Image (tube, rainbow, N blue to C red):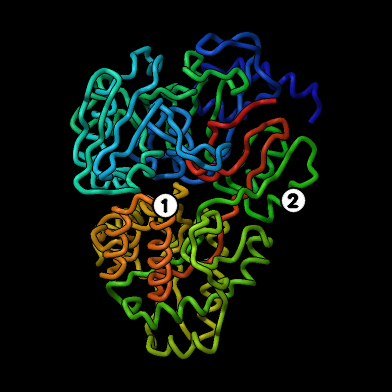
Amino acid sequence: MSSQNRSRRIILGAALLAIPLVATSLAGCTAGGASGGGAAGGSSTAGSTTVVVGFKHEFNTMDPLRADYAQTNMVDNIVYEPLIKFDAAQDNKMVGALASDFAVADDAKSISFTLRDGVTFHDGTPLTAKDVQYSFDRYIRLGQGVASLLQGYDSTTVVDYSHVVINLKAPNAFFINGLANVYIMEADLVSKNAGADDAQGWLQAHEAGTGPFEGTGTSSADGTTVKRFDKYWGFDDKRPTQMVFRRIDESATNRDELKAGNIDVSFGLSAVDAAALKGQSDVSVKFVPTSGQTQLWFNTSTGPTADPKIREGLKLAFDYSGGFQKILDSNGAISSGILSPAFTCRPDAKPSAQDKAKAKELLSGLGATSLDLRYQSVDSTQTQIATLFQSNLKDLGVTVNLVPIAFPDYLKTLADPATIPGLTLINDYILTPDPGAGLDKLYNSANIGGTNKGAYSNPKVDDLLTKARTVADAGDRCDLYKQVQTIVGDDSVQANLFQVAFPVGYRSDLKGIDFSWSATPISFFTLRVG
């Protein structure tokens, strides 16, 4: 794309600042080039830059309660902030965000925080310890979404205006890791709009955060628009002045819109369409390795998949190498365990591999029983993987019915082991370098009916996770985590297919398109123009 066209797009982006999302999407506004200078906490100067992001799946809400949805978190990650975060520049060391200082008690039963000076919410209200208390208590009260990251939370003690202590019911050394995705909201504003549902309705299209971007009230199922908050405590004028999040479910449409310059970042590309963009002028393509894996989850408590032999047979039936080459274009990696290669704490294991003879032997117990496989049909890669699995099983005489399901609907099935699908294809992520909280959510039997996706129960795993909570040393916890991973793998709780290497197409002058522990596949917190 010529520099002359980019200049025209800057003007267009500036002109559309006040236009509703529908109109913005139809116009396909984008903007190139860097914004004008500015000082921390100051106001923006000359130059307007708009970045339009194409993403897949429905955008349900801006409520940070549902930051467990990738679509919600990609926006909330720049509208809200947590107390702490992981700093990629410091080897993913835990550092302060809204907290300038923090300390875990020697008994691992409490964490104290000192809040950063000079932080305000988007309406100008100063951040105080009361906002932290309100936010944590609301998550626990509603008991959904990121509340799963707060298991073991007891209470919040407000020491004074800028000091707060999080109290736990029992020692939990990995509790603090989950806080990197627990966002703090303005207590008075959310309370004022609580209504009958604790502000869940209001927060669908509104926000109450402190982050570098603020909402514009344009949210709908098809996306949202945010603008740069120029009084942000960490202001950087290289951030775009506006970001438009636009839902585009079809990979080919994402590809063509990026080529045409109508979007600037695409999260909706298949590996094939991403490869087709390589060499395109003014467009870069990166397969971002993530902490996620494509997995086939089994209901381990009811139905045919309650039999571990059936689960093992299903694992061995899949053509991993064929899917990796033909569907993923050999990007990422074939899984070699229940955690992504992004983690350092993993037991040695060989990559998953097909064994048709053994699979047929193990699956003979199914007889004429057919299986239903739930998958997200709006994701072309998932559709291809599900179809390949169906074909692999057909070769072994097993009928698999493909049943589309929306991710929010899938999450609802987890409330009761009897409603969890026998087979579900999903991309699953653990968003902290220390995998303890994620392993606990997924495999602790205490979380059946919540975050335990397979209704899995093994007393040995429960005991190891309980012990890990009391171990302060990260290396010693890792030894326990490795034991958990080995047992879960032997129990065939899920088939681990591929590491998710997320294809991202983007305008070449954008910086900061990199893996992040805080959002999938990247955090726009690090995005800069020019």
Q: Quadrant of residue 487?
A: bottom left
Quadrant holding the N terminus: top right
**Looking at the image, residue 484 lies above or below residue 174:** below
Q: Earlier in the sequence, mark 1 or mark 2?
A: 2
Estimate the spatial distance between the alpha carbons at disc 1 and disc 2, rounded to whole Å. 43 Å
Q: Which residue is mark 1?
A: 474
Which mark's residue is nearer the viewer, 1 or 2? Answer: 1
Would you call the spot at circle 2 few (<14 residues within 10 Å), some (14-19), or many (20 or more)? few
**Residue name at image x 55 percent, y 51 percent:** 290
Amino acid type of disc 2? Ala
Residue 348 % position (x, y): 53, 69
Q: Is residue 486 above or below residue 20?
A: below
For residue 271, side relative to residue 243 (left or right): right
Which residue appears at 26% of the width and 17% of the height? 161
Q: Which residue is tagged 2?
A: 276
Within 10 Å of disc 1 (Cα), the crowding (few <14, some 14-19, many 20+) is: some
Position in image of residue 197 (x %, y %)? 21, 34
What kind of element bears circle 1?
Answer: helix
In this view of the protein, which residue sits in the foreground, 91 or 50? 91
Type of the residue with mark 1: Ala
